[in-house]
Image: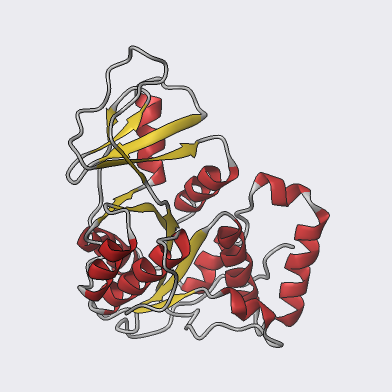
Amino acid sequence: MIDLHERLSEFSYGFGATREAEAALRSVGVTATPFLPSLIHEKVLGFDVAFDRPGAVLMLQFKLGQQMKRYRSVPPGKPGPPVSSPFWRFHLDTTEDQFRLLVDAEQRGAEAYYVAPRFSDWQEYEDAYQAGAVLDRSLMVRPSDIERELTARSQPAGRHRVVYDLTSRYICSEPIPLEEVRTDGMVAKVFQDLRVKPRSLGDLVSVLSEVRTADRARRSASTSSRQAIQARARSAEDAAAAMFAVEAWSVGAQAIFVTDPEVGAPLEQSGGAPAA
């Protein structure tokens, strides 16, 4: 029995999905270290990762899809997506901080995914958790793929719905098919980042530390928080990783730092502290 919550929540679902993502990455011989918010409260802030090794950053944005009995078009009269029961939906807004941060992080080298369960209640989650099948029973789509499909169909930026069943997925109100990524595809993409064009994790988090939500970038409190992180960090790389992970956490995204211990020599890093 999993001692988390009686009712399925994004926290409990995210716990199981993160645990499986770690296991899937480690199964191919790489090291996966998820960010934990409790790290920020430690006196000396440091990550147990090798910043001079080839690295990748995985971001998982969890969404609990609402199970639907029937599809209601908005505006009325538009054709609905060809989905079968059971099916689910979740909302996203391509102009808001969460979506923009994920796309920005992708453009700077992170691997980012929306992750949503193909189940709705606690018992189904517990069954999937015990079977190690939370990710296999989930939808994974890349924010950049959503943006690309909307742009290709001349759809306006703003609020949209992702509607999906056990085998298909669409971005609506116009039902546009989306490409789905399975667990092995996600692992393969991270592994490719590590081996094909390797860059040190330190260099990658330095670039990603500049990713900020528009709202937090406007607030002086955010700058003060970043300066406090720099002051307590064990190194410039630890500070950069923490600043990025905290920014991701502020919109509900889980950051996982991945390194490749199999590559022979550490990579040279460009150096330089991230800006506050």
Residue at 77%, 73% (x, y): give it.
228
Q: Position of residue 7 (x, y in %)?
A: 42, 62
Quadrant for the C terminus, please. bottom right
Residue at 61%, 79% (x, y): give it.
38
Q: Position of residue 40 (x, y in %)?
A: 65, 77
Total labels: the figure holds 0
Q: Is residue 255 left or right of residue 146?
A: right
Colour approach in the figure: secondary structure
Residue at 80%, 64% (x, y): give it.
224
Q: Is residue 270 left or right of residue 254?
A: right
Residue 196 can be seen, yes or no: no
Q: Is residue 16 above or below residue 69?
A: below
Q: Is residue 139 above or below residue 53?
A: above
Residue 138 can be seen, yes or no: yes
Q: Position of residue 236 (x, y in %)?
A: 65, 76
Q: Position of residue 67 (x, y in %)?
A: 32, 43
